Image (cartoon, rainbow, N blue to C red):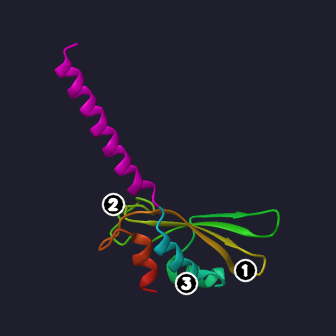
């Protein structure tokens, strides 16, 4: 191999590594602001009130200790008929809720926070307007 080709290959590999690292930071970064807002809004709220306000759960799993885990995905307004809850628009906020035996939300954990309509966080958009 010629020295010029080796140098170009090393530069390309370094550039690719840098791009992957930068992309990885934004993809896997947790949104602490959105998590804090969700905690402020929903911890201690009766789980029925949450679903009345934000929409129904997608998955419900009763636990042996009497708590119930819920998977919740934000509503999508522009969805295609018969497309399920995702529809055309995939700008969603997915949260795992754990309700205690008393029926109140004990924990709320963001599982997925897609870019929103007007910001980088769909979860912030959903819970800021409440």
Q: Is residue 102 magenta?
A: no
Residue 79 in picture, x, y percent from top left: 35, 65
Secondary structure at numbered mark 2:
loop
Circle 2 or circle 1, nearest the eye: 1
Nearer to the camera, 45 or 38: 38
Where residue 11 is drawn, which disc sits there? none
Magenta stretch: dominant SS? helix
Residue beneath disc 3 = 41
Q: Is residue 101 left or right of residue 55?
A: right
Report the quarter where the N terminus lies.
top left
Circle 3 or circle 2, nearest the eye: 3
Q: CA distance from mark 2 to mark 1?
A: 33 Å
Residue beneath disc 1 = 103
Question: Is the residue marked by circle 1 packed among few (<14), some (14-19), or many (20+) residues within 10 Å?
Answer: some
Secondary structure at numbered mark 3:
helix
Residue drawn at the location 35% of the way across and 51% of the way down: 22
Asked if 9 appears above or below 78 in the picture, the reply is above
Asked if 71 appears above or below 20 in the picture, the reply is below
Question: Is the residue marked by circle 3 packed among few (<14), some (14-19), or many (20+) residues within 10 Å?
Answer: some
Residue beneath disc 2 = 88
Residue 70 is drawn in which quadrant? bottom right
Residue range (magenta): 1-29
Q: CA distance from mark 3 to mark 2?
A: 28 Å
Residue drawn at the location 57% of the way across and 69% of the way down: 57
Residue drawn at the location 72% of the way across and 69% of the way down: 68
Nearer to the camera, 38 or 33: 33
Residue 123 in picture, x, y percent from top left: 44, 72
Q: Is residue 14 left or right of residue 130?
A: left
Residue 9 in picture, x, y percent from top left: 25, 26
Residue 26 is drawn in which quadrant? bottom left
Nearer to the camera, 52 or 37: 37
């Amino acid at each position: 191999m010629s020295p010029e080709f080796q140098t170009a290959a090393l530069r390309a590999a370094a550039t690719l590594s840098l791009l992957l690292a930068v992309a990885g930071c934004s993809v896997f970064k947790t949104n602490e602001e959105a998590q804090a807002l969700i905690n402020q809004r929903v911890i201690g709220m009766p789980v029925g009130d949450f679903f009345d306000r934000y929409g129904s759960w997608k998955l419900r799993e009763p636990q042996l200790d009497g708590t119930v885990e819920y998977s919740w995905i934000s509503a999508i307004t522009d969805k295609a008929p018969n497309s399920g809850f995702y529809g055309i628009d995939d700008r969603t906020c997915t949260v795992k809720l754990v309700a205690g035996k008393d029926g109140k939300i004990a924990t709320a954990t963001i599982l997925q926070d897609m870019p929103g309509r007007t910001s980088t966080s769909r979860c912030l958009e959903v819970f800021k307007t409440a």
